Amino acid sequence: MRSSYRTAVRAAGVAGTAAVMLVAGSAGALAHECYVASRSDQGNAMAGTHSAAWQTVSLEFIVTNILGQTDPAVVSCTLSEAAAAGIPSSFVFGDKQATGQDHVIAENNPNMEAKGLSSNGTGIDHAADVYGGQIVGIIIGCGGTPPG
């Protein structure tokens, strides 16, 4: 019971950080919305359920609990449109592996922005850079309130 509570608290913390990054549209100092873009669905399932360093966070959780969309019609529309746009229904975000400088995985790499490495679909990407603007646009298009 206690372990599942800690997992839920940790997942909520990761999701909250991720949502802030999605709304802000850029990766901040914590950059916990990092995910492995090139990992398979099976790899995500294994990492999200068997590793303390990765947490699975559903898009529905982000849209409702973090981005504040409470109207069921807006949520349903957002999830449907996001799926049609190829946005994953869940993310496996990094949680504990960032032990480098400033507690980030790759943010101090000058090539992240200069060469677009944070959104190139391989290795470590930032959800905000890849999907943030798209998700917010879908929410607005579905009649939701812009987050933030």
Image: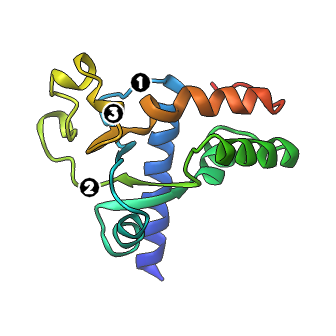
The crowd level at tag 3 (other Cα within 10 Å; few <14, some 14-19, many 20+) is: some
Whether the residues at callouts 3 and 2 have beta carbons within 8 Å, the answer is no
Amino acid type at mark 3:
Asn
Asked whether, in this view, residue 146 is left or right of residue 66, the answer is: right
Residue drawn at (27%, 20%) of the image: 113
Element at label 3:
loop
The reply to whether residue 147 is in sight is no
Mark with earlier residue (3, 1): 1
Residue under numbered circle 3: 120
Residue drawn at (33%, 36%) of the image: 31
Amino acid type at mark 2:
Lys
Element at label 1:
loop
Relative height, residue 119 to residue 93 (above, below)? above
Amino acid type at mark 1:
Ser
Q: Which quadrant: the C terminus?
A: top right
Residue drawn at (23%, 26%) of the image: 112
| x and y percentages locating residue 84 in the rendered image | 68, 45
The crowd level at tag 2 (other Cα within 10 Å; few <14, some 14-19, many 20+) is: some
Relative height, residue 36 to residue 121 (above, below)? below
From mark 3 to mark 1, how far is it between C-alphas? 15 Å
From mark 2 to mark 1, how far is it between C-alphas? 20 Å
Q: Quadrant of residue 86?
A: top right
Q: Which mark is residue 26?
A: 1
Residue under numbered circle 2: 96
| x and y percentages locating residue 44 in the rendered image | 39, 64
